[in-house]
Amino acid sequence: MMRYQPRQRGVAAIEFALVLPLLVFMIFVVSDFARGLQANIVLINLSREAANLAARSKLQLTDNSQAIMRAVAQSAPPLDMNGQGMLYITKLMGYKDSSGAISTVVLEQYRWDDSVNRLGFRVSGYAPASRLWTCSNWNTTTGACNNIPTLANAPRISLMSGNLFEGEIVYAAESFYRFNVMFGNVSLGGGLTVPNFGTNLYSMTVF
């Protein structure tokens, strides 16, 4: 029967002590990556559901935009959307100008700022700019963008430009999340690097 000598046991203990910090680090890295991946998946689902509800609703966005965003945000655990997240819903339309070209224009835009239930921006203070179009004057009661120009003067965006029919309405929902990343762009050696999800996660869906 083979027996380990005290010296061999000592060497094994030293080797384990040297490797242990690396193993612990790897566990944290994998956990951080899993958190980021899960957050991205949740944001994709949020933007899909918000755009879907906006498109199917029989009510105007002026009446139910905050209800839609509140409902989808409540389905976001484990993400803390009320403290770390933001949602936008933008109503878009295909507009034919005098040249006959059809472009995409912004009709309405709403951000999650629920004055009735005190949710969203008024709690988190987190308001990354919409990546579709940036509003400069928000209504603090309804969460709507004020004084958006109409028709020929309406803001034009590149999204789906030339792909909409004249007068066709679509809804774009954006979801943001302020993600607290612990590890990102960390080299593991051998050409392997931990992906960096960034601190502002984002998803957008159009219905």
Image (spheres, rainbow, N blue to C red):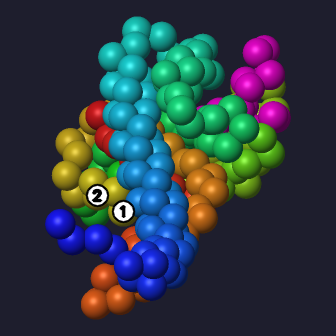
97 in relation to 1, above or below: above
**Residue plotted at (29% across, 34% down):** 207
Q: Mark 2 and mark 1 in contact (Cβ < 8 Å)?
A: yes
What is the quadrant of residue 124 in the picture?
top right
The residue labelled by disc 1 is 158
Amino acid at the residue labelled 2? Ser
**Residue plotted at (46% across, 60% down):** 27
User: In what element is the residue under mark 1?
Assistant: loop
**Residue plotted at (43% across, 28% down):** 50
Q: Is residue 196 visible?
A: no
Residue 142 rendering spot, x and y as whole percentages: 73, 25
Residue 54 rendering spot, x and y as whole percentages: 42, 23
In this rendered view, identify the residue nearer to me: 92 or 130.
Answer: 130
Please say whether residue 85 is one of the residues in the magenta stretch.
no
Q: Which residues are magenta?
A: 110-123
In this rendered view, identify the residue nearer to me: 169 or 194.
Answer: 194
Q: Quadrant of the N terminus?
A: bottom left
158 in relation to 136, above or below: below
Residue 55 rendering spot, x and y as whole percentages: 35, 24
In the picture provided, is 70 more to the left or to the right than 26? Answer: right
127 in relation to 138, above or below: below
User: In what element is the residue under mark 2?
Assistant: loop
**Residue plotted at (36% across, 34% down):** 45
Which of the numbered marks, if any, corresponds to residue 161?
2
Amino acid at the residue labelled 1? Ser
